[in-house]
Amino acid sequence: MTSNSETVFLPVPVKNTEKKGSHSSMAFFVSACLWSFLTFGLAWKFATYSIWIVVAGVLIFSVPIFLCGFYSATIYKIRRLNMFQSKGFLHRLFSRRALMWIFWVLWAMFSSFFMLIQFHTYDPFEWAIYFLVIPVFWLVFIGARRIYGKELKPYLVTHSSLQLARKICPIVMLLIYVLAHILLNHFTIYPTLESAVAVEKSKVADMTGSALVMETSQFLAFYAGIKAYVLGKIAVLEPTWQMLFLCLGNLVIFYNACCILSCFLIPRIEYRRILAPLTEDVIPSKPSVVRIVIAFAVFSFIAGFIFLPGVASLEIYMRQTPEFKEFREHVEKQTLVKVELIDNHFFREGTLQELDMAKLQSLKEIEIAYIRVENQLDRGFDKLEDNVDEFLDWYYSLFGEYTRLAKLLVGDLETYMEDKMVEYFEKGDVFE
């Protein structure tokens, strides 16, 4: 009975998989393009008019990131439970998904909030790099699926392929991002750090619809200005691995983009695993009505009774607390240090002027020391002239002449004369 069911069942999934594979590519790119337009529209309008766009944008972005992460966590739980023989206490303990659920809810909401602020500052070049994630992710996924499809269990093929693509694609995109900046020379050289920060802040100047977003965007613009200024200086000197280090923050954006794209490649039937009990079945069972109602109730509770009141409370706090803005401006003033480039090295602004002042002071001290040394040399030479007379008296004396004649015969005249000159000329330590 079992063998007959296998012979009847196996050819059907293979055929359907091929059909779905050809269809999924078109469906994926259509869904990805629609999502790209939605992303661009949300980023353009984000926090420019009202707070409701902030709430809607974060919720819209959070849902696919959460679904991808929670689906991946569910498959991980299923694989981990394979070690148990029976469904006892440990099996029930390790099958809990509450912690992973909470983690992905928080990650999706917080990262979506900062991503939308970042998208609002993108220029056409950065948008082009961001949308390049779509074909890169697809190619990595297809390659991984061809490898895993021959060896893994059916329910693990899609998950493992997407997981590998989410690991490789962000790194590839980061390298593309850095290389594109280097090859296309897409750097802005700012004369001062203040000008770089001012330019970045001008990109978020219209985000006045929400006090929470406005203050957050000011901090992010401050960081982006410092990064842009340093990248411009590094590009002038020599592109190095330091550029890659400064761009590591883009990994989060590329990773979340891969999470969103993963939702378009997870088969619809696989989404049952998110709500259904953990199982290795190729076709998971439909979740019960009770589980669907509970999931909907939990989502409504989080969105309506935690997220919305939380955002509203933060918004009111930001509007009624000018001290927060004063604190931010104080921090910026304290940390914004002007720098200048001297011999391919960064120094605090004013260092060159201080060096010039030190040079002038040193020249004055050298001039005074030079006059003092000249006076000392004059006195030394005066004493030396006095010693010359004593040397000449000895030189022309009878004893001196016969002594030199004897030294000449012996062959030691030059050494003898040197010793005598030192003896007479340095008498009294004239240059002490």
Image (tube, rainbow, N blue to C red):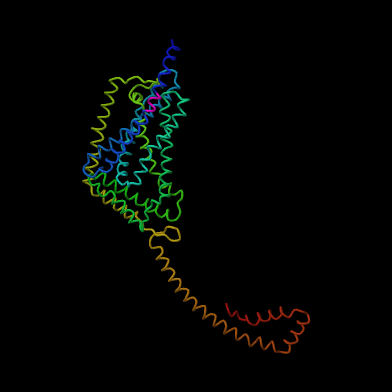
> Across the whole image, how many numbered discs are drawn on residues?
0
Q: Can residue 288 be seen in this view?
A: yes
Which residue occupies the foreground of this view, 266 or 204? Answer: 266
Which residue occupies the foreground of this view, 348 or 259? Answer: 259
Main SS category, magenta section: helix
Name, please, the residue furthest toward the right. Answer: 409
Name, please, the residue furthest toward the top. Answer: 1
Q: In this view, does 307 lie above or below 402?
A: above
Q: In this view, does 147 lie to the left or right of 101?
A: right
Rendering quarter of residue 294: top left
Q: Residue at x 43, y 27 (%)?
A: 157
Q: In this view, does 188 lie above or below 367?
A: above
Q: Residue at x 21, y 46 (%)?
A: 320
Q: Does the magenta stretch include residue 20?
A: yes
Q: Position of residue 154 (x, y in %)?
A: 42, 23
Q: Position of residue 194 (x, y in %)?
A: 33, 56
Q: Quadrant of the C terminus?
A: bottom right
Q: Can residue 68 be seen in this view?
A: no
The part of the chain drawn in magenta is 17-22
Q: Where is residue 207 in the image (x, y as percent from the top left)?
A: 25, 46
Q: In this view, does 378 lie above or below 289?
A: below
Q: Which residue is drawn at 25% across and 34% down?
A: 306
Q: Which residue is drawn at 40% across and 46% down?
A: 247
Q: Is residue 360 magenta?
A: no
Q: Is residue 119 left or right of residue 280?
A: left
Q: In which quarter of the image is the N terminus?
A: top left
Q: Where is residue 84 in the image (x, y as percent from the top left)?
A: 44, 20
Q: In this view, does 422 lie above or below 89?
A: below
Which residue occupies the foreground of this view, 118 or 421? Answer: 118
